């Protein structure tokens, strides 16, 4: 299993070297907009999908060949990174080896109700959880979560994370035309976001081909209004 990819150009991070430690399409959500396609293993079970030594070895080999080959390291995958058992130890090991590179984790935030998962994310310089819904109905329509997940629990987990996390907390919101972009819902989302006090809100929409046909993004003008 190859665990690194890129680097991928990023407006905020520069050249971001991706780290993927989860078997493709193993996720706690089956989001209709996911650019990686449908989830094939809908799961909340944390597993050691790949030995940490393999990840560290691939990073070492990459930087031996490309000493200045990245401006940041980002845990981002075709699945949910927090499903990786031992994520905290791996983040610590990477941070010790590459202290000069910002370490970022992109997550759907669904496992943040687990205090162990929240603690494991502390070595990261920036964590970007997502929140696309302010109601159970929209949560089920857009994220199609594992049956044991409830929106209230996800939001409670985000609050716990926001209270304790020492790094930069960015909240990502993905807007889908005709589903979570009406004015009333946007107001409800804004209230939740304000209570979380993130360092930044990243408002995005569907651009790449989504998992489900008919899922559309917002226009530039609509995004400006939503913001």
Image (cartoon, grey):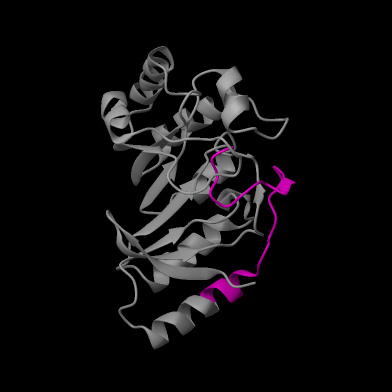
In the rendered image, residue 146, in percent from the top left (x then y), is placed at 70, 35
Quadrant location of residue 198? top left
In the rendered image, residue 19, in percent from the top left (x then y), is placed at 50, 64
Query: What residue is shown at x 64% (from left), y 32% (from top)?
Result: 144
**Placement of 213 over or under 151, stated as above or below:** below
In the rendered image, residue 48, in percent from the top left (x then y), is placed at 68, 60
Left or right position of 148 against 217: right
| Quadrant that contains the N terminus | bottom right
In the rendered image, residue 112, in percent from the top left (x then y), is placed at 54, 37
Left or right position of 48 against 12: right
Quadrant location of residue 165? top left
Between 19 and 205, which is closer to the camera in this rendering? 205
Quadrant location of residue 124? bottom left
**Placement of 211 over or under 138, stated as above or below:** below
Query: What residue is shown at x 45% (from left), y 68% (from top)?
Result: 94
Image: magenta residue range: 32-56
**Residue 69 visible in rendering:** yes
* Furthest residue toward bottom: 65
Between 119 and 27, which is closer to the camera in this rendering? 27
Q: Main secondary structure of the magenta part?
A: loop
The verdict on residue 34 being magenta is: yes
**Placement of 12 over or under 158, stated as above or below:** below
| Quadrant that contains the C terminus | top left
The verdict on residue 205 being magenta is: no
């Amino acid at each position: 299993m190859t665990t690194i990819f890129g680097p991928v150009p990023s407006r905020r991070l520069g050249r971001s070297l991706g780290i993927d430690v989860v078997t493709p399409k193993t996720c706690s959500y089956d989001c209709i907009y996911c650019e990686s396609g449908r989830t094939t293993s809908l799961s909340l079970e944390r597993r050691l999908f790949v030995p940490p030594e393999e990840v560290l070895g691939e990073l070492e080999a990459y930087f031996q060949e490309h000493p200045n080959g990245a401006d940041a390291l980002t845990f981002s995958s075709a699945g949910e990174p927090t499903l990786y058992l031992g994520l905290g130890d791996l983040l610590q090991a990477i941070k010790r080896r590459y202290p000069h590179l910002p370490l970022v984790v992109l997550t759907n935030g669904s496992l943040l109700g687990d205090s162990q998962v929240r603690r494991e994310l502390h070595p990261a310089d920036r964590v970007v959880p997502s929140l696309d819904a302010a109601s159970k109905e929209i949560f089920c329509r857009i994220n199609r979560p594992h049956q044991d997940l409830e929106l209230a629990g996800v939001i409670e987990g985000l609050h716990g994370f926001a209270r304790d996390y020492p790094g930069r907390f960015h909240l990502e919101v993905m807007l889908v035309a005709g589903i979570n972009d009406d004015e009333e819902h946007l107001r409800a989302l804004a209230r939740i976001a304000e209570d979380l006090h993130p360092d930044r809100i990243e408002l995005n929409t569907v651009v790449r081909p989504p998992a489900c046909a008919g899922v559309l993004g917002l226009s530039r003008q609509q995004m400006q209004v939503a913001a």
